Amino acid sequence: MINDISGILDRREVIKTLKMLIFAGLMTIIPFFHNQMITGPLVNALLFIAVCLFGARIAILIGLIPSLVALSLGFLPIVSAPIIPFIMVSNALLILIFDIFWKKNYWAGIVAASLGKFIFLSFFSRLVLELSMKEKIAITLANMMSWPQLFTALVGGLLAYVFLRKIKRI
């Protein structure tokens, strides 16, 4: 099968496609951990790694998967559905900011991207949730979308750094 494809595509493209499929598979599996302090760093690490390996466009596509899986399989409370688009946009923002910086200064990229995601998601999730549900539930969900997002993004950046150093990509 691969020999048939390699006649059409260059071997490097086949390998790159297989790597992207592995990343998509990992992003599909990660929500099954059900713990924000595990899933957050893993998702963010894979987003940072995807930028370095595949570029921002592919990373953004890969970044849509965890939120869709988590919501569709019931891993997130249905009341959090209104903030899913904002989570997706915050992941895209993380990717785009990191993409601007990472080749010049990896750590500046991690910090700027993490702060950008944190600020965006904190603001919009609180706004949307306060407008759409009871105060107690809104506060709980908004808190999940605030400081833990900064923490998990920074830890994800550290995990990505260890991996990327190991494979000699940075």
Image: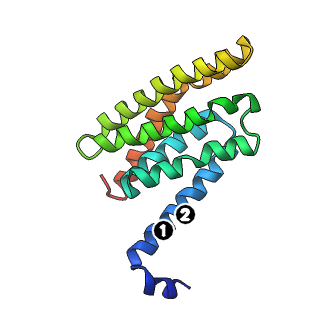
Q: In the figure, 18 relative to 104: above or below?
A: below
Please provide percent x and percent y for residue 14: 46, 74
Amino acid tagged 1: Thr
Q: Give coordinates of residue 68: x percent, y percent.
A: 65, 45
Residue 142 on image: x %, y %: 61, 20
What residue is at 46 percent from the left and 41 percent from the top?
A: 92
Q: Which residue lies furthest to the top in this view?
A: 135
Q: Is residue 146 visible?
A: no
- Seen in the picture, residue 4 relative to 117 is either above or below; the reply is below
115 shown above or below 39: above
* Residue bearing the label numbered 1: 17
- Label 1 to label 2: alpha-carbon separation: 6 Å
Q: Residue at x 62, y 47 (%)?
A: 30
The outermost residue toward the front is: 131
Binning the other alpha carbons within 10 Å of mark 1 as few (below 14), some (14 to 19) or many (20 upward) gives: few
Looking at the image, which residue is at 51% across and 20% down?
123
Q: What secondary structure is marked by label 1?
A: helix
Q: Total marks drawn?
A: 2
Do callouts 1 and 2 mark residues in contact (Cβ within 8 Å)?
A: yes
Task: Give the class, few, some or many, for how many residues have Cα within 10 Å of label 2's Cα (few <14, many ≥20).
Answer: few
Per the rendering, the mark at residue 111 is none
- Residue 34 position within the rendered picture, expressed as x and y whole percent measured from the top left: 69, 39
Colouring mode (rainbow / by chain / secondary structure / one colour): rainbow
Label 2 amino acid?
A: Leu
Can you say which quadrant of the picture contains the N terminus? bottom right
Secondary element at image label 2: helix
62 is higher (above) or lower (below) than 90: below
For residue 21, the mark is: 2
Residue 140 visible in the picture: yes
Give the residue drawn at x 47%, y 26%.
Answer: 120
